[in-house]
Image (cartoon, helix red, strand yellow):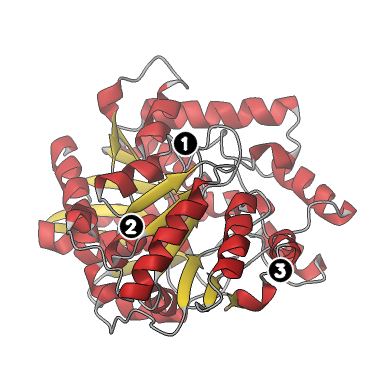
Amino acid sequence: MKKILFLSYYWPPSGGAGVQRALKFMKYFREFKIDPTLITVDEKVASYPLRDDSLLDDVDKDLKVIKTKSFEPLSWYKRLNKKKEIPYAGFVNINKDKPFQKLSRFIRGNLFIPDARVGWVKYATKAAINALKDDPEVIITTSPPHSSQLAGLKLKKKTGLPWIADLRDPWTDIFYYKDFYHLPFAKRKDANYEREVLENADRIIVTSQATKELYLTKTDKIKADKISVIPNGYDEADFDMPTSFPDKEFVITYSGTIADLYDIDAFLKSLKVLKDEFTDVPIKLRFVGKVSEGIKQKIKENDLLENCEFTGYVSHKEAVAYLLRSSILLIVIPKIENNEGIVPGKIFEYLAAKRPVVCIGPENCNVGEFITECESGSTFDYGNNNVETYLREQILKWKENPSLQIENDKHLKYSRRMLTGKLAQIINEIS
């Protein structure tokens, strides 16, 4: 067994999408003769936007987990904030127009670089150094939060051990970056951190081809073969539950957070037309997760409020169950610059659910490529009214047979087990 250290801020009972990648790598590493030790923050001091205790059931009982202290400025934010909640990345779940929120984002952007979890770096680094007594051969850091990569950078310089930086999202090009009002010095400092990580890591892992191409523009000191694409995926075990196609109503499910940047205007207008056209078909639009007030207002303007179900945040297990009780699934890419490479991890769970997927986003987006590759739906640009035609076709099929199941198995290559095998191969290459 090859020993490694794996640093991840997010770990159960943290909820949300960010925890899934590390959790599933840990679950399957041993099948590939990799013996990991995980270093994370103690949940008693962590600032998690979401909590999902059910994920604790998925933790390998034999996994060695080292939990550390941390300095968490977001805990102070929570105390001062009237809603008493931890913001999501980019504060996308927070009203951005209020003076307190603007000040909070300014402080975050200029005092806490690269992010508000930077107070974990020294504790994570110390814990990793103490764990060197077990003779790990490779260090892996995963982000966001990108401050985790600063711990990897410190460890690389101190130990010389091979280091893999797993960058799940863009860094200084993330779509909400401009919302933090960075002063010039802060931008320079953050860009320097980003470049230093890219240049010093032995290998870089990203989740999409577009993100790889983006990082290659940051420095001329790295070659393309230094960056490997390992997308997020789905865990077959998560889908070991009853599945059913609703026959009393046509159910469209969106899973995850949806904010004002997610342009679904044309989709909602099309749905309104179809609602009026198919008076004999009850249509339900189900949102599993947090929905912004702006999106709810657009739903109301299209007279679709009575057709909507808002479940709020649920456990990952419950979210998968909702996918498996749907007619078709909806995914939306935020309408911002350079959004082609945004690949929400849920797309692979959508594909595994074997329901037709409607993607609203740029026509050349990576998500659309996955959908096309797996022959599992269609992608429509934000203002493309052809989504109405596609939805009409699906409703007519549903009236003939409520089961709209995708019959191929082209999604199997994106199982978490297979993707962990790819990471294990990289570990073996550099050690």
Spatial separation of the CA atoms under disc 3 and disc 1: 31 Å
Residue 10 seen: no
Q: Number of labelled discs?
A: 3
Q: Tell whether label 1 touches label 2 (CB within 8 Å).
A: no
What's under tag 2, amino acid-wise?
Answer: Phe
Residue of label 3: 303
Spatial separation of the CA atoms under disc 2 and disc 1: 17 Å
| In this rendering, the label closer to the viewer, 3 or 1 | 3
Q: Residue furthest top?
A: 220
What's under tag 1, amino acid-wise?
Answer: Glu
Residue 7 x/y as whole percent: 38, 54
Residue 180 x/y as whole percent: 72, 41
Residue of label 1: 340
What's under tag 3, amino acid-wise?
Answer: Asp
Q: Secondary structure at mark 2?
A: helix
- Reply above or below: 302 against 126: below
Spatial separation of the CA atoms under disc 3 and disc 2: 31 Å
> What residue is drawn where x is 25% and y is 25%?
225
Using a 10 Å C-alpha cutoff, classify the residue at mark 1 as few (fewer than 14 neighbours), some (14 to 19) or many (20 or more): many
Residue of label 2: 348
Name which quarter of the figure residue 66 lies in: bottom left
Using a 10 Å C-alpha cutoff, classify the residue at mark 3 as few (fewer than 14 neighbours), some (14 to 19) or many (20 or more): some
- Residue 324 versus residue 345: which sits nearer the camera? 324
Residue 383 seen: yes
> What residue is drawn where x is 22% and y is 59%?
415
Using a 10 Å C-alpha cutoff, classify the residue at mark 2 as few (fewer than 14 neighbours), some (14 to 19) or many (20 or more): many
